[in-house]
Amino acid sequence: DTGVSQDPRHKITKRGQNVTFRCDPISEHNRLYWYRQTLGQGPEFLTYFQNEAQLEKSRLLSDRFSAERPKGSFSTLEIQRTEQGDSAMYLCASSLVPEAEAFFGQGTRLTVV
Amino acid sequence: GQNIDQPTEMTATEGAIVQINCTYQTSGFNGLFWYQQHAGEAPTFLSYNVLDGLEEKGRFSSFLSRSKGYSYLLLKELQMKDSASYLCAGVLKAAGNKLTFGGGTRVLVKP
């Protein structure tokens, strides 16, 4: 297993367009997180899954954001009608159990122009 | 609350020791993690504390006091490559055992 992978690594999009990011966690990991990070800040929680169940979505997240993990394996994060404020690094992480080390992917850097 | 607080920035000299403090305001605590993040890269795991006391791993040590809601990361014999952000993160039972991060402490190591 090569760890957590995210695709694409970089995305530039025009304001108002929709974007979708993919995360492939480590294969036996049941817990999957999505975070957003801007320069100089810590990762901000967006949502997380236990297997295919989405357990929580941040209250700070607008309805333009949605995430899925249909078979409890890979996950997608979609942002509809992107805004310039959505520009950030989007990080995915997975862990075997909640109390275990979470492994991060390299992130998807989104730039909305 | 679920706040995790740590200083924004610290500066230290190569070869010295730096201690990064982290406090959390919650009950139902289920573990405290420290991650290192170099600019433009993903966070990487450094340490995990769930019981009180000191965990030592080479030049890095992490301490936890659950009764005080307090942890620190100790970096010894600082090297230039240690310049990075250090993230404190907690797993909180009251929050469904999700991993929640502080704002990170940027450490600058000077020659």
Image (cartoon, coloured by chain):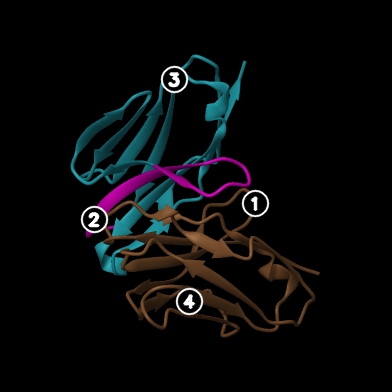
- Camera-side residue of B5 and B14: B14
Classify the position of the N terminus of chain B by image quarter: bottom left
Determine crowd level at label 1: few under 14, some 14-19, many 20+ residues with C-alpha closer than 10 A: few
Magenta stretch contains residue A18: no
Chain at tag 3: B
- The residue to which callout 2 is attached is B30
Q: Residue at x 74, y 70 (%)?
A: A84
Q: Position of residue B30 (x, y in %)?
A: 24, 55
Q: Are marks 4 and 3 in contact (CB under 8 Å)?
A: no
Measured in 3D between alpha carbons, the distance from the residue under mark 2 to the one under mark 4, in whole angstroms, is 22 Å
For the C terminus of chain B, the image quarter is: top right
Q: Amino acid at mark 2?
A: Asn
Q: Which residue is mark 1?
A: A39
Q: Colour of chain B?
A: cyan
Please tell me whether mark 1 or mark 4 is closer to you in this view: 1
Upstream in sequence: badge 3 or badge 2 = 3
Query: For numbered disc 4, what is the local secondary structure?
Result: loop
Q: What residue is disc 4 on? A: A59
Residue B59 vertical position relative to residue B53 in the rendered view, above or below: above
Q: Going by the image, does B29 lie left or right of A14?
A: left
Q: What segment carries the magenta color?
A: B26-45
Q: Residues within 10 Å of mark 3 (few under 14, many from 20)?
A: some
Instruction: Report the residue that reaches farthest toward the front.
Output: A1
Magenta segment includes B29: yes
State the CA–CA distance, disc 1 to disc 3.
Answer: 26 Å
Q: Secondary structure at mark 2?
A: strand
Residue beneath the point at 80% across and 75% down:
A14
